[in-house]
Amino acid sequence: MNNNGSSSKGKAVMFARESKSQNKLVQEMFLVATRHYVDTLREEIRKAIEEKLEQGVYPGRAPFGYQNNRTQRSIEIHPKTAPIIQRIFKLHATGQYSMPKLQRAISKSTGVKLSTKRLRCILQSPFYTGSFVWDGRKYKGTHHVLVQAKTYGKVQRLLAKSQVRTASCAPTARRTAHV
């Protein structure tokens, strides 16, 4: 034992006052460790999302016509809004409905008010046929189909013929696997 009562085997370096440079070094070490943690967490989340996508699980909120089942972590058909989706596709597939006319017909028959942009986005979405696009790549989903591929194809041909510019249907929150 030495004079201050500690063993000479486990010597510790003690500073009378911590220097600014030492504080800065410690802060920078914590910052590096934190960045490493965040980067590792980001990679793990990306892997988990990619795995879910490959399994056909949509990693977002269910679109209009569907609902999220939180207990089973799945997307299922919404009993009240799914028939509205089917009606939207059925009416537009006749070729006799412009977007404003379709908007009025849906509002009158169901009481649901949808903008023409929202209607166009619904009609453009492959989700209703059982697949979905995530980060520019198409996946076969595990959710139930609301619209048959034949009807969807007819609607897409009609939309392509129309003079109206294609709506940008990107959601406000980006649907990409960035964290």
Image (cartoon, rainbow, N blue to C red):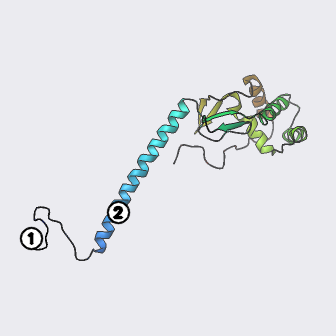
Whether residue 77 sits left or right of residue 37 in the image: it is right
**Quarter of the image holding residue 144?**
top right
Nearest to the observer: residue 140 or residue 116:
140
Q: Are marks 2 and 1 in contact (CB under 8 Å)?
A: no
Residue 2: mark in rendering: 1
Crowd around label 2: few <14 · some 14–19 · many ≥20 (10 Å): few
Q: Dot 2: what SS?
A: helix
Judged from the image, the secondary structure of the residue bearing numbered disc 1 is loop
The residue identified by callout 2 is 28
Q: Say what amino acid the circle numbered 1 marks.
A: Asn
Which label sits in the foreground, 2 or 1?
1
Give, as a three-letter code, the residue at label 2: Glu
Which residue is drawn at the image coordinates 32% and 65% (left, top)?
Answer: 26
Q: Is residue 5 above or below residue 78?
A: below
Q: Which residue is nearer to you in this view: 19 or 10? A: 10
Q: Measuring from the top left, give residue 119's x and y in whole percent.
A: 78, 40
